[in-house]
Amino acid sequence: MSDGGTGEKTEEASPQKLKQARDKGQVSKSQDAIQALGFVLVFATTALTITITAKKLKDFLYAALDSAVRRGDDLPTVLAVVNEALWTTLTASLPMLGAAFVAGLVSNYIQVGFMFTVEPLKPDIKKINPVDGFKNLFSKKKIVESVKNILKFTIVSYVVYATLRDAMREVVLSARVDLWHGVAIGGQIMYDIAIRVTALFVIISAADFFFQRWQFNKDMMMSKYDVKQEYKQSEGDPHMKAERKALAEELILHGSQQNVANSDAVVVNPAHIAVAIKYDKEKGGAPKVVAKGMRKHAETIKAIARENGVPILRNVPLAQALNKLDLEEEVPEELYEAVAEVLNFVYELRDKEAKAAEARRKAKQPKTNSIPPSGKGPGNPPR
């Protein structure tokens, strides 16, 4: 497929796409894992608080029966019983509700970490569009979820049926014993069902966790065209990138103008490369590259060198080698000899220029007549 189309999604999602999806609330998350952890914590909490809860229910039933026998069914008595029933139910279920809440927080944090976004809450016309809603209803994802829910319901139903079938003798026996023995038998049966259903949900959630991770990664995959488009958006068009690079080079060059002016020599190749080098005798070490540029930047470096009287020397191999070095990097040992020749030439040139300048300075000075030690001379008064 040509680059103009979307193409087949064969590339893994980029970090930028994953971040954009996360900002929108789109992450890999298994609801079954949340439910399974909820089952485990609620079951554990129930097992730890069953004695206290049973005592509360027992005390409530005794109090309710006592009120009905002693006080009758007048309105204040009924309201008091209802109020006590609500309070008992709330205090008995509060630990389980807290466990379910904690399970949701912990499971979400384990799967996706800390995430806060209001993007899913924003109004979206697609959410109320009946056509899009109908398409989503029969989308592949919805069909898979529906099949999973049907399978879970079927399996859980069979587990409950199998548990009750195995406990049929106890169920029949519960009809022949007193109330509290019957409650104990029923509690044991519910305990067995809870254990099996919880174990089943843990297994299902583990499978669903890896399935959701695989499905999310598959949905996030990109085509080669998508990768190119993302690169253009993040890095910019190649032409814009070239302009930014040129601007960066200009900024670097602008900061290196003083370095060029203070350099010992500029080595050129002769139209494409210009590298300014400097040797600090006081600090010692090797000479350093203090400025460099190519093409128009090389011309700028040469212009700065001419303005400041810095020698410009043509040496194609040396210029190419020096251009590979970073700014402020010392010249490597293999270039010592070539750079030394350049610097010796520069120093000799400076000495010659200095001597020539001194000679010109002396030549411009006016000549003065010396006074003879004896005799008449200009300015001597006669004896």
Image: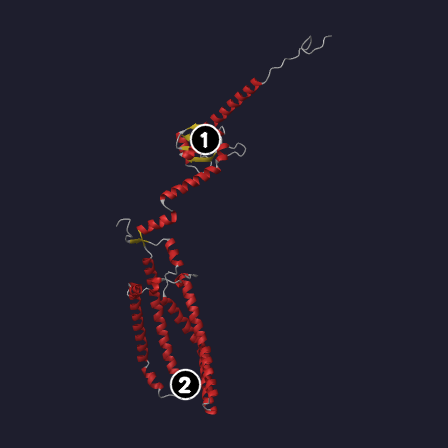
Query: CA–CA distance between discs 2 and 1?
Result: 104 Å
Q: Which mark is on residue 180?
A: 2
Marks 1 and 2: in contact by CB < 8 Å?
Answer: no
Q: Residue 26: horizontal and vertical position, in percent?
A: 37, 60
Is label 1 in a helix, a strand or a loop? helix
Report the residue at 39% width, 80% height from top: 187
Q: Residue 382: horizontal and vertical position, in percent?
A: 72, 8
Q: Nearer the viewer, residue 187 or 361?
A: 361
Tell me which amino acid carries mark 2.
Trp
Relative horizontal placement of residue 3, taking residue 92 as reference (left or right): left
Q: Nearer the viewer, mark 2 or mark 1?
A: 1
Tell me which amino acid carries mark 1.
Ala
Q: Residues within 10 Å of mark 1 (few under 14, many from 20)?
A: some
Residue under numbered circle 1: 303
Is label 2 in a helix, a strand or a loop? helix
Against 35, residue 366 (above or below) is above
Upstream in sequence: badge 2 or badge 1: 2
